[in-house]
Amino acid sequence: MQLDQATPEQLRQWESQLAADYQAILDKKLNLDLTRGKPSAEQLALSDALDGILNGNYTAADGTDTRNYGGLDGLPEAKQLGANIMDVDAANVLVGGNSSLTLMFQVMLTAYQFGLKDAASAWKNEGEVKFLCPVPGYDRHYTVCEQLGISMVNVPMTANGPDMDTVEALLKADKNIKGMWCVPKYSNPTGVVYSDETVERIAKLGQIASPNFRVFWDNAYSVHDLTPNAPQLASILAATRRNGTEDSVIQFASTSKITHAGAGVAFVAASATNLAGFKKFLNTCTIGPDKVNQIRHTRFLPTKDALMQHMQKHAALLNPRFDAVLSALSSAFDGTDLGAWEKPVGGYFVSFDTRKNCAKETVRLAAEAGVKLTPAGATYPYGKDPEDRNIRIAPSVPTVPEVVAAMQVFVTCVKLASVKQKLAGLA
């Protein structure tokens, strides 16, 4: 189907057929959900051995009684688990509660309100604060900025990561830009893995940006490969050390999509300066993290090999779901002008771009047909996709047959929205 080459008569015929197909779907009264990138029940069950794993032994390797207060940094073995996930030195890791998003908010609040170096370095002292946001991106990042009143500036994503020419030009022109969000491996939602050149250029940003500039490096999918020969992400820590910019990048990760999503462990990896500033803030609001949960995780995933073997089990459950999505898109849209999509080899999402001004209508039609999708625009700051094109598909929770059924609906809705929009343009 090439809409731009179709005659008005062909378009009306397609609309009539698609309307009939859509009505048949409505009659099924489906109730399917592709909105959030959560682990499925089968994935969560992979970590059920966490329950009871301590068997009454609450003592950490260094003799710490994990049932008690203290340990702001986290247990040494938990730091090593974070190091295994993020490919950093354990000495650079701080271990928190179950949510890396909480740590991101807390670090940003510290930088904004109190300063990561000293009170004079607080962003609030420097007028309007702006953050660079590669788009499409992760909606929760935008919510953090909105909560703190930080203005967001869109930066286009490319096949290699953020458009670094744009990033560098913006930073040179505007010292009010204090940071940038990054999901460097299997970026949410596109699935892009940052190239080695992009990682190197990001590491050099500290040389041209404001002294208090920070990259928030949310490496949420660092070990979430779907294929055996997964692409490798260059080490941002090594790159910043080469360039003398170690203070400019703060890394985050968690076990949220590795073990039990609501009862995991989160990590910050940063320079000594950044960690000292953040711990000063933490000292005012906590007596220490949940060390019992930390030690549970270190006994469940004691080595890097154990971690990767565990993630292979996740991949075995996720792959059929992703295959169902990609197969449906390929069958329906290869060789057409109805949309474009990424083919990720890891992470939790498939990003689909409709024709211009068709995403909201596609999502609306799907919702009426019983298939919930992430709201159109959610992958852009302030919920505003300037071209109304991007839709994030999250296939992890439904069963494979449910994903197949949901994609049949999705395909029909994309086609119907596209034909209706094209006909409206001819009126």
Image (cartoon, rainbow, N blue to C red):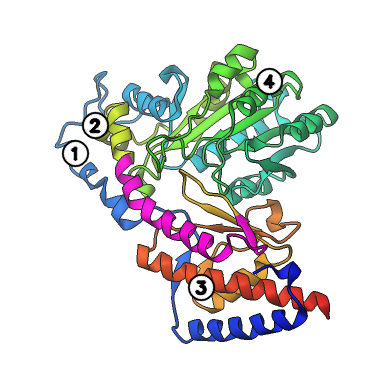
Which residue is painted at 64% across and 14% down in the image?
243
| Span highlighted in magenta in the image | 312-340
Residue 29 point in image, percent of width and height: 45, 83
Check disc 2 and report the residue beneath it.
299
Asked if residue 311 lies in the magenta stretch, the reply is no
Q: Real-space Cα distance between discs 4 and 2? A: 38 Å
> At label 2, which amino acid type do we have?
Arg
> At label 4, which amino acid type do we have?
Lys
Which residue is painted at 54% across and 25% down in the image?
280
Asked if residue 329 lies in the magenta stretch, the reply is yes
Vertical relation: 235 (above or below) 163: above
Per the rendering, the mark at residue 53 is: 1
Q: Residues within 10 Å of mark 3 (few under 14, many from 20)?
A: many
Check disc 4 and report the residue beneath it.
204
Relative to 12, 282 lies left or right: left
Check disc 3 and report the residue beneath it.
409
Which residue is painted at 76% across and 29% down in the image?
168
Depth order, front residue of 111/168: 168
Relative to 393, 398 lies left or right: left
